[in-house]
C-alpha cells in the first residue's frame, strides 16, 4: 500500500472530522469464533415466513421483542404479507419506533416476495415498493449500520426455508460489512445447510483467477478459510505473488494466462491431476484496466481489456460446461464493477466488460440451475487496493466517501460476498449481482 501523503493524512484526521469532512464509522467485520452480531435481533411483520425466520434465527442469534428498549444489532421484517399499496403503512408502523433503538453496525433485512413472480397486481406493486423503502432506510442509517432487501420466490414458505438461511447468515453478520442497499433474489431450489457453518465450503475445489495479489489473493484466502481447496491462477509473470498465495492457502499455483485458448483444458487437467476431482467453484477475478478517453484509445487497449475481463470468463466457463468438468452444485462467480453499472469516463473498454459480466450471469443462470448450481457476480465499488491507493489525492478522497458508509471497502468485503455465493447452501441464490460498494452514489 502506498505511503499516506500529507494531504491524505490531513483529510483523514480528527481535525478534518471537526470541520465536517466525513470519516466513516469503523465497520465491524466477521471474525471466526465471535458472535455473528454483537447485540440481539428483532423479528417483525406477520408474513408467511415469520415462523420459519424465528426458528432459523433463534439458534445463531439472541432474539429480542420489538417493544424492548435494549439496542438491537439486527432487525428482520417479514413484509410478505403486505399485498396492497395501502398496507405499506405496516412498514412505517413497525420501523418508526425501531429507528431510535438501533445499535452501531446493525443490520436491517426486509423480506418480500419476488415481484416479477407475483400475479396479483396490488401485491406486485406493494412488493416492488419495498425496494424504495429499504434503499432509503440504508441511506438514513449511521455508524456502520446497513439495510438490504431479500426477495424470496412465492413458492418458498416455512416448509422449505433452508434455502434462505445462508443469505440471512451473510447479511446478519460482519461478512456483509460493506454491502449496503442491495436487493438479493432467492429462487425456489432446495439447499441443505452445511454440516458446519464455519466451514461451508468443506470438500469443495475452487479456482480463483488473478490470485497473485489484490482482491484475488484475499478471495483465495477466504475460500480456504471456509474449507475449500484452492487452485490459484495468475499470469506466469506474477511468479512470487502467486506462489505466496498458494502457500498461504495450502493450495496449488497454476501459472496460466486466462486468455490462453487452452485455459479451460489446463484448468480441468490440473484439477484432475492434483486433486482427482472436478472444479466446484470457479471465480473469474482476473481483470485489468487500460483507461483512455474513447477518442484517444488505441485498439490494443480495447482488445486487452475485453479479452481478459469478459471473453476469457465466458469461453472458459462454456468449455468447462461442455466438457462436463464442473462438479455437483457448481458455483460460477464473476467480478463486475460499479463502472459496469454506472459507466465511467475514460473506461469505455472496462465498463463494457463489467456490464458484460452482468449479461454473462443473466444468460447462464438457467443453465447453472439445471446443473444444481448457481452463477452470480459481485460488483465492487471503491475498494482499498494498490490501484486505488495510486489514484490522485482529490478523486481518491472524494471516491472513498461517495457512499452511505462514507469510506472505502476492504478486499475482504469482496471476498466474503464471493464466499457466500460459493457455498452449496447458497445454490438458491442464482442470477444475482451484489454490489460491494457501501451503497455508492454511482449507478445507484
Ligand atoms: P489487481 O490488478 O491488483 O489484480 C488483478 C490480478 O489479475 C493480478 O494479479 C494480475 O496479474 C491478474 N491478471 C491480469 N491479467 C491476467 C490474465 N490474462 N490471466 C491471469 N491473471 C491475470 O486488481 P484488483 O484490484 O485486485 O481487481 C480484481 C478484480 O476486481 C478485477 O476484475 C477488477 O476489475 C475488479 N474490481 C476492482 C475494484 C477495486 O477497487 N480494486 C473495483 C471494481 C472491480
Image: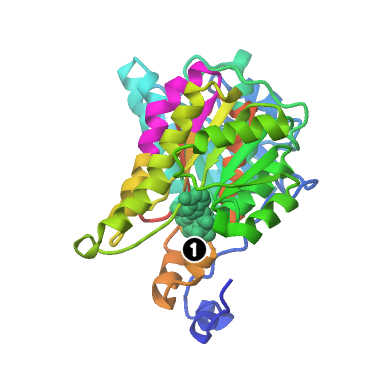
Q: Nearer the viewer, residue 367 or 165?
A: 367
**Label 1's element?**
loop
Q: Residue at x 38, y 19 (%)?
A: 117
361 magenta-colored = yes
The relative height of residue 227 versus residue 272 in the rendered view (above or below) is below
Give the percent coordinates (x, y) of residue 92: 45, 39
Instruction: Provide the residue designation for mark 1.
Output: 406
Q: Residue at x 35, y 35 (%)?
A: 359
The relative height of residue 41 versus residue 204 in the rendered view (above or below) is below
Q: Is 381 situated left or right of 350 in this image? A: right
Give the percent coordinates (x, y) of residue 316: 47, 35
Is the magenta region chiefly helix, strand or loop? helix
Give the percent coordinates (x, y) of residue 386: 53, 67
Q: Residue at x 51, y 47 (%)?
A: 285
Q: Nearer the viewer, residue 62 or 370?
A: 370
Q: Name the outermost residue toward the right.
A: 33
Give the percent coordinates (x, y) of residue 31: 74, 50
Q: Residue at x 32, y 58 (%)?
A: 301
Q: Is 416 situated left or right of 313 in this image? A: right
**Quadrant location of the N terminus?**
bottom right
The relative height of residue 330 versus residue 8 in the rendered view (above or below) is above
Task: Report whether the residue tagged 1 is closer than 8 Å to ligand 1.
Answer: no
Q: Give the quadrant of residue 409.
A: bottom right
Q: Which residues are magenta?
A: 357-375
Residue 143 seen in this snapshot = no
Dot 1: within a 10 Å radius of its alpha carbon, few (fewer than 14), some, or many (20 or more) residues? many
Q: Name the outermost residue toward the left.
A: 295
306 magenta-colored = no
The relative height of residue 97 versus residue 396 in the rendered view (above or below) is above
Amino acid at each position: 500500500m502506498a505511503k499516506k501523503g500529507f494531504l491524505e493524512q490531513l483529510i483523514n484526521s480528527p481535525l478534518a472530522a471537526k470541520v465536517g469532512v466525513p470519516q466513516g464509522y469503523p465497520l465491524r467485520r466477521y471474525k471466526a469464533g465471535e458472535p455473528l452480531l454483537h447485540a440481539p435481533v428483532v423479528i417483525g411483520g406477520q408474513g408467511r415466513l415469520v415462523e420459519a425466520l424465528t426458528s432459523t434465527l433463534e439458534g445463531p442469534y439472541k432474539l429480542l421483542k420489538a417493544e424492548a428498549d435494549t439496542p438491537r444489532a439486527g432487525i428482520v421484517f417479514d413484509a410478505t404479507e403486505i399485498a396492497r399499496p395501502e398496507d405499506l403503512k405496516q412498514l412505517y408502523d413497525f420501523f418508526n419506533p425501531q429507528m431510535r433503538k438501533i445499535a452501531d453496525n446493525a443490520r436491517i433485512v426486509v423480506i418480500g416476495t419476488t415481484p416479477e413472480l407475483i400475479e396479483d397486481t396490488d401485491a406486485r406493486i406493494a412488493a416492488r415498493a419495498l425496494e424504495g423503502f429499504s434503499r432509503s432506510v440504508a441511506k438514513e442509517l449511521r455508524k456502520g449500520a446497513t439495510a438490504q432487501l431479500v426477495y424470496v420466490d412465492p413458492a418458498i414458505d416455512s416448509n422449505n426455508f433452508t434455502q434462505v438461511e445462508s443469505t440471512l447468515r451473510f447479511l446478519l453478520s460482519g461478512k456483509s460489512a460493506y454491502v449496503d442497499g442491495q436487493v438479493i433474489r432467492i429462487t425456489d431450489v432446495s439447499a441443505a445447510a452445511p454440516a458446519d457453518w464455519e466451514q461451508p465450503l468443506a470438500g469443495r475445489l475452487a479456482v480463483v483467477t488473478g490470485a497473485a495479489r489484490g482482491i484475488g489473493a484475499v478471495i483465495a484466502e477466504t475460500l480456504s478459510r471456509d474449507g475449500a481447496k484452492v487452485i490459484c491462477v495468475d499470469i506466469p509473470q506474477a511468479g512470487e505473488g502467486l506462489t505466496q498465495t498458494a502457500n498461504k492457502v495450502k493450495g496449488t499455483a497454476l501459472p496460466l494466462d486466462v486468455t490462453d485458448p487452452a485455459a479451460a483444458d489446463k484448468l480441468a487437467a490440473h484439477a484432475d491431476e492434483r486433486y482427482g476431482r472436478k472444479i466446484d467453484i470457479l471465480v473469474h477475478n482476473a481483470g485489468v484496466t487500460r483507461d483512455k478517453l474513447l477518442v484517444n484509445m488505441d485498439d490494443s487497449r480495447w482488445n486487452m481489456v475485453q479479452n481478459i475481463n469478459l471473453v476469457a470468463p465466458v469461453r472458459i466457463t462454456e468449455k468447462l460446461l461442455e466438457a462436463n468438468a464442473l462438479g455437483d452444485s457448481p458455483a460460477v462467480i464473476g467480478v463486475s464493477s460499479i463502472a459496469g453499472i454506472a459507466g465511467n469516463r475514460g473506461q469505455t473498454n472496462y465498463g463494457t466488460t463489467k456490464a458484460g459480466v452482468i449479461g454473462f450471469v443473466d444468460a447462464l443462470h438457467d443453465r447453472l440451475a439445471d446443473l444444481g448450481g448457481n452463477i452470480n457476480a459481485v460488483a465492487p465499488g471503491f475498494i482499498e487496493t494498490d490501484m486505488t491507493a495510486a489514484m490522485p489525492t482529490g478523486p481518491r478522497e472524494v471516491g472513498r466517501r461517495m457512499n452511505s458508509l462514507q469510506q472505502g471497502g476492504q478486499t475482504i468485503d469482496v471476498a466474503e460476498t464471493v464466499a457466500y455465493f460459493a457455498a452449496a447452501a447458497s445454490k438458491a441464490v442464482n442470477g444475482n449481482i451484489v454490489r460491494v460498494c457501501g451503497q455508492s452514489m454511482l449507478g445507484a
